[in-house]
Image (tube, grey):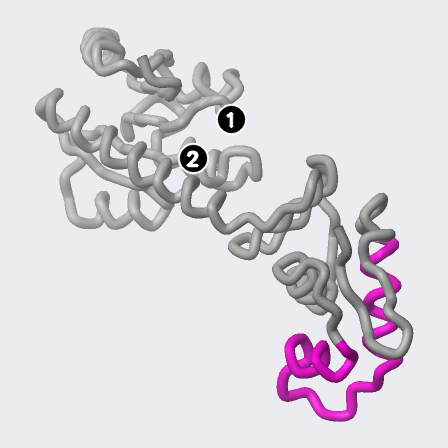
Amino acid sequence: MNSYHLLVVDDEPDLCEILQFNLENEGYVVDIAYSAEEALKKDLSIYSLLLLDVMMGDISGFKMARMVRENPKTSTKPIVFLTAKTSENDRLTGFAIGADDYIQKPFSIREVIARVNAIIRRVNDGNKSAKSEIISYDTLEMNPINKKVLVENSEVSLTKKEFELLKLFLENRNRVFSREEILTRVWVDEDGVLNRTIDVNITRLRKKIGQYERNIVTRLGYGYCFED
């Protein structure tokens, strides 16, 4: 069994049970909600994918999807609409909200499973790709894709130049960079940048990365490096 947790939101109990049965046979863990209101009481951040009916009660699938997208904890969750609304405008509305797929009723269960598998696979491959880009040293991690830096799993806020300095040092540990080299790599095509500017940015960077400040060392007369 895989570890992916899905949520089916539809006001047709029979359809929910059919989807749950078949998706669980595929190896997914599947929860059901019979309305958007019921679904929104759940912790949506735990789900790997949401399957939403469009035409439901006071809160439609479209409205719920907008709420999901506006919440930072769920903004990237894959959403698949299951709906009898088949007009081009309806489909365009769904995709404009941020749907990953739009499946028209009546549908083949095999088609739903195939599309869910494809989305889960794509998201998983994307996560693997992002993880492969991570540059790390002990509990210091930086992700060049989303521009985040973590120290012991706590995010550190860096300026663009501080981020680029840290990236340069982590990718070239134990190599000493002169101020001139740092200028050509971090302050590309910027004129009038003083050596003092580099020193100030490195001082700020050291303060922000906690225990790893001692790893950024000064080699008098030569420059700076990140030392193991």
Are the residues flagged by discs 2 and 1 in contact, CB closer than 8 Å? Answer: yes
In the picture provided, is 62 more to the left or to the right than 16? Answer: right
In percent of width and height, residue 148 lies at 63, 50
Name the spot of residue 57 as percent of width and height, x first. 35, 21
Q: Toward the viewer: 17 or 133?
A: 133
- Mark 1 Cα shell of 10 Å, populated few (<14), some (14-19), many (≥20): some
**Percent from the top left, x then y, of residue 49?**
36, 28
Q: Is residue 64 magenta?
A: no
Q: How many marks?
A: 2
Q: Position of residue 76 (x, y in %)?
A: 45, 40
Mark carried by residue 45:
1
Q: Is residue 28 left or right of residue 156?
A: left
Secondary-structure class at tag 1: helix
Q: Is residue 76 left or right of residue 195?
A: left
Q: Main secondary structure of the magenta part?
A: helix
Q: Amino acid at mark 2?
A: Lys
Disc assigned to residue 87: none
Label 2, label 1: how far apart the Cα atoms are: 8 Å
Look at the image and tell me whether residue 86 can be seen: yes
Tell me which segment is drawn in magenta.
178-207
Residue hosting label 2 = 77
